[in-house]
Amino acid sequence: MQQLKINGGHRLVGEVRASGAKNAALPILAAGLLTAEDLVLHNVPDLADVRTMLQLLEGMGVRVDRKGTDVTLNAGAIVSTKAPYELVKTMRASVLTLCPLVTRFGHAEVSLPGGCAIGARPVDQHIKGLKQLGADVEIKEGYVVARAGRLQGTRIVTDMVTVTGTENLVMAAVLAEGRTVIENAALEPEVVDLCNCLNAMGAKIEGIGTSRLTVEGVDVLHGAEHTVIADRIEAGSFFVAAVVTQGDILVTHCEPHHMEAVLDKLREAGAQLDIGRDWVRVRMTGRPKPVSVRTVPHPGFPTDMQAQFMTMNCFAEGTASVTETIFENRFMHVPELMRLGARISIDGHTAMVEGVPSLTGATIMATDLRASASLVIAALAAKGSSTVDRIYHLDRGYERMEEKLRSLGADIVRVRA
Ligand code: EPZ
């Protein structure tokens, strides 16, 4: 088991480059199944979840050529339409292969993802929409087994805003017969990036970036070349690290217009922001002001930044509330932060955070991806040394995090426990 050893109290200063967005790369890699031609991708982050998705695709017969952040896929000779439990249980986004497989090959056998630390995270909306498009779908021995002739376009209204649900259903619709309208579609930049990539492949999607997507089905999709957008959550995590260490960080190759809600909250906390076309500089002197947040679908404050802002509020001059409306169990970083001396009380979906002048290092345990980032950030600003355990959670969504933090002046090393 690997751990991160951190000696806190160092101001983070310098420049760091945002990687490609995990949550855009994963659906776009799955979209490679939709064509027999090469899908040439750039800015694909080197993450555990991306490696798992590539392994899953290779197991189906997709040819994968990877050089650094460039990945070329070719699904011209698929040998299997099965996503096995052994891989799906480690990466829920494997469910994004379900609809591409059904709409192109008429068959898919994808393991149900199973539980997740932050919530039950069912995929009922993915299944409901696929059935509405004409597929026969049943759950057999923990697998979603779907069969279909050519899917038939229809109108779908998802019961709630679902990011991968929207992505899966768009990928089903692009090769369906006729028109599909998806209402209540997710607006996340990663959904937009997938739709732009699909249109580059010859799909006909309109309303991109709105909650009403209209897809005219086509008979075949061709290859394309696409650059994945920057990771707004990785960038946001570095911004919070700059605030709590009273540092000065320039994040380059990011997309400020994808992060407006987070940037507004950083200003509210008293950070000084300079914003360019593809860069953001965050400077902080003194303790942050308390900033209450409530997670909602994009363009509101993102749930994937909730844990990081909980950490920031631990150091604030005052009390703030943090309300999580998307997932039912996304406060597991709270007891770990309290081991560092944080003062947090939870009442249902809301945590009240009473800021303290400083936290004290300790051994803490990562429980899920964004919680692990919030613990690393807290340890960077805490007095003394901390050990963060189970950092495989961090590696799922952050590319070389400790290297990037060291380049900013952090005292952090990865050790094998
Ligand atoms: C995506 O998960 C992201 N993952 C998550 O990022 C992110 O937190 C989440 O969207 C919300 O923004 C990827 O894109 C790979 P949802 P997803 O479907 O699509 C319920 C990270 O840290 N729901 O938008 O699984 C669900 O339980 C990860 O990078 C159903 O009930 O989230 C949740 O309460 C964590 N039935 C809510 O909707 C369904 O069929 C939103 O979930 C689908 C979802």
Image: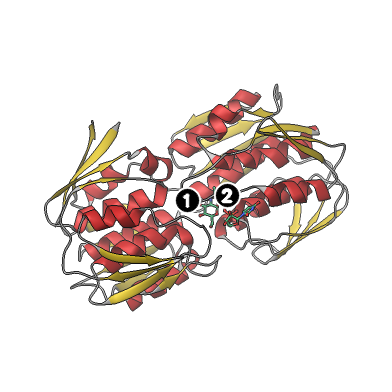
Residue 314: x and y, percent? 26, 66
x and y percent of residue 161 in the render?
A: 64, 61
Q: Badge 1: few (under 14), some or many (20 or more) residues near its Cα, within 10 Å?
A: some
Three-letter code for the amino acid on which mark 2 is drawn = Arg
Residue 118: mark: 1
Q: Position of residue 376 (x, y in %)?
A: 27, 51
Q: Which mark is residue 228?
A: none
Left or right, 417 with respect to 212, comes to left
Q: Are marks 1 and 2 in contact (CB under 8 Å)?
A: yes
Q: Is mark 2 within 8 Å of ligand 1?
A: yes
Cβ of mark 1 under 8 Å from ligand 1: the answer is yes
Q: Residue at x 33, y 41 (%)?
A: 400
**Is any part of residue 252 visible from this angle?**
no
Q: Of the residues shown, which amino acid type is indicated by label 1? A: Ile
Secondary element type, mark 2: loop
Q: Who is closer to the viewer here, 342 or 232?
A: 342
Scheme by which the image is coloured: secondary structure
Identify which residue is drawn at 84% across, 42% down: 219
User: Residue 58's quadrant in the figure?
Assistant: top right
> Residue under circle 2?
121
